[in-house]
Image: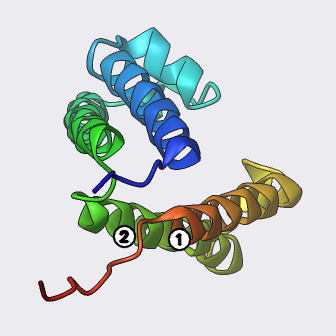
Amino acid sequence: MSKPPYRVLRVILGIFSLFTAGGGLIIIFSSRPTVMRLLLRPPESEVSTLLLLVTKEMGGLILMLSVMLFFAYRDPARNVAILDALTVGLCILAFTPLWSLYTLDMRQLYPSYLILGRSVVRLVLAALLFYLRPQESVPKPS
């Protein structure tokens, strides 16, 4: 019995894996000026040692996500739970900036249309991953 091809899903997962690995490594090995550039040049007093420590730990979590995406890339049918977690995570990440836009004064930092556009892109990616995920089938008795 041949395995069904998940070519589009594998390409998407491979791209996500590469981008998250690159981002995680950049965050882990970044210095204070790089973090300030990534955060759109905040006041230097706002970039503390604690913030640098937390960003490096976040880089480790992003690298861990990259490894999980790589495993899902290799065999999407066996790693449906990773795909489901990524889909739910993208949905959560689509709504949290909107909540921050509603509750905080973020319009001074970022334009509203960028936040809305990023949320729409995340929801579209989540819908695409949900559509492309392998369907669980009931094994047929022999």
Q: Residue at x 40, y 61 (%)?
A: 86
**Residue 47 in the image, given as x and y percentages of width and height:** 40, 30
**Residue 45 in the image, given as x and y percentages of width and height:** 44, 29
Q: Is residue 25 above or below residue 133?
A: above
- Of 94 and 43, nearer the camera is 94
Quadrant including the N terminus: bottom left
Please, what is the three-letter code of the amino acid marked with disc 2?
A: Asp
Q: Is residue 92 above or below residue 42?
A: below
Quadrant including the C terminus: bottom left
Please, what is the three-letter code of the amino acid marked with disc 1?
A: Phe
Q: Residue at x 79, y 59 (%)?
A: 107
Sequence order check: which comes first, mark 1 or mark 2? 2
Q: Residue at x 41, y 32 (%)?
A: 20
- For label 1, the residue is 130
**Residue 30 in the image, given as x and y percentages of width and height:** 35, 13
Distance from Cα at disc 1 to Cα at disc 2: 7 Å
